[in-house]
Image: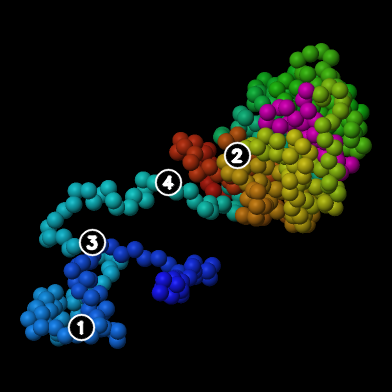
Amino acid sequence: MDSAMLRRSDENRAVTPGKAMRAVDRFIPSRSALDLDIAHYNLVKENTSGADVDLASEVASPSKEEYKKQLACAFLSGAGENAGSSGSAARNKILAFKSKAPVPSAGNENASRGVYTSNDAGSVKTKKMFRHVPSAPERILDAPELIDDYYLNLIDWGSSNQVAVALGGVVYLWNAESGDITQLMQTSADNTDDYVTSVQWGADGKHIAVGTNAAEVQIWDVARLKQVRTLRGHTARVGALAWNGTSLATGSRDNNIMMHDVRIREHCTSTLTSHSQEVCGLKWSPSGTQLASGGNDNLLHIWDHASIGNGTHLHRLDAHQAAVKALAWCPFQSNLLASGGGTADRCIKFWNTTTGAMLNSIDTHSQVCALQWNTHEREILSSHGYSQNQLCLWKYPTMQKMAEFTGHSARVLHMAQSPDGNTVVSAAADETLRFWKCFSDENASSKTKKLKENADASVLRRFAFR
């Protein structure tokens, strides 16, 4: 007997559901929405209506039958003709999973209603997935005699909000606030072969370095429009400059990089000779601890400030297949460097300068002339030459192209960024400068916006340096 009961219990034991049954949802009834007495009555009614009903339960006294009828009428009043109505159907439910809130009385105002309502859209700042990027230039300046040479660096935007641009043998300063144009310097008229090959503002916005085809580097005081020093030592044109405090790095067609301390008489502190062809790109990291140099030998070198006096580089990177001129240090990651290659390479590459590892490489299908990081968003802007002559805005690190800026009719050789990081100026071989508000900070103060609007009320105006 016991073994038979054990076997029967084993047969009736529920089988553990397999993995395929785990997708079935699970509902928990709400007791507050149930009438437990009616639910119990319905359960008993269903259980007693089966085929295995005990015969003893079918024999009942008339008084018990009458009691059941009265109980059914009490619980299920109106179930006869109105059994299909929603009210009776709701009461006949054995399990209820939700209940509707009672209707408030007329004129009732809940003082706590505002606590549970959704927040006002105006009071909560939500981050936009996409921002508007103007596709047209904000301003155009004519730049006659801008030299069409990929290896030169002829434009820079200083912290004093002045743009320095070299046109032939002359350097002009354009004040971005007032629109005034000032001639800073001109190469010697006696040497017709001399012209300006590079310009670079000092961090103080008061001094500017100018490299020339005559292998000189001149330091100018902008406020007095006066040359204060001449640095010599190169034997060919100086096409790349990079300030780091009072230290100035200069790159030349003689393949050398010279380090100068402009405060002392013997200004040359070291000479770096790792490149085998013209040095066309120089950039100090924002922290001033590392220097990146690119050359026409397709090489990119990373130099450490602490050991630069020994003349040994930290990393020698040879992944590019063309000249490396475009260099840009990331403003939000100190050891991230972006570099761009020339016509035979056409790639933007990203480097970890601590380890020397290449993190990513993107083929832009066009010569990369210059790079600028957005200081407000994780974006990078590239300017291109053959064959598209456009500017491209990329989202980092996905490198999804966000926008293209067209308008230049020749390769876009140079770019510089405004001190507030909102505007980028591009200089092209079509002898024009175009100002693009592609890095606009939407959280910028209204005061700054008003000053810029007052500086130039027109959306598009043309100026000429001559």
| Number of marks present in the image shown | 4
Q: Nearer the viewer, residue 414 or 245?
A: 245
Answer with mark 1 or mark 2, whichever residue precedes in sequence.
1
Residue 462, image x and y in percent? 62, 46
Q: Work out which residue is located at the far top of the displayed protein and give it.
A: 265
User: Does residue 431 appear in this view?
Assistant: no
Answer with mark 1 or mark 3, whichever residue precedes in sequence.
3
Label 3 belongs to which residue?
A: 32
Q: Which of 80 and 57 is in front in this view?
A: 57
Label 1 belongs to which residue?
A: 56
What's the residue type where badge 2 is placed?
Answer: Thr
Where are the magenta residues, as a range? 279-306
Q: How far apart are marks 4 and 1 (CA)?
A: 73 Å
Label pair 3/4, CB-CB below 8 angstroms: no
Q: In this view, does 408 lie to the left or right of 423?
A: right
Q: Which of labels 1 and 3 is toward the front?
A: 1
Answer with mark 4 or mark 1, whichever residue precedes in sequence.
1
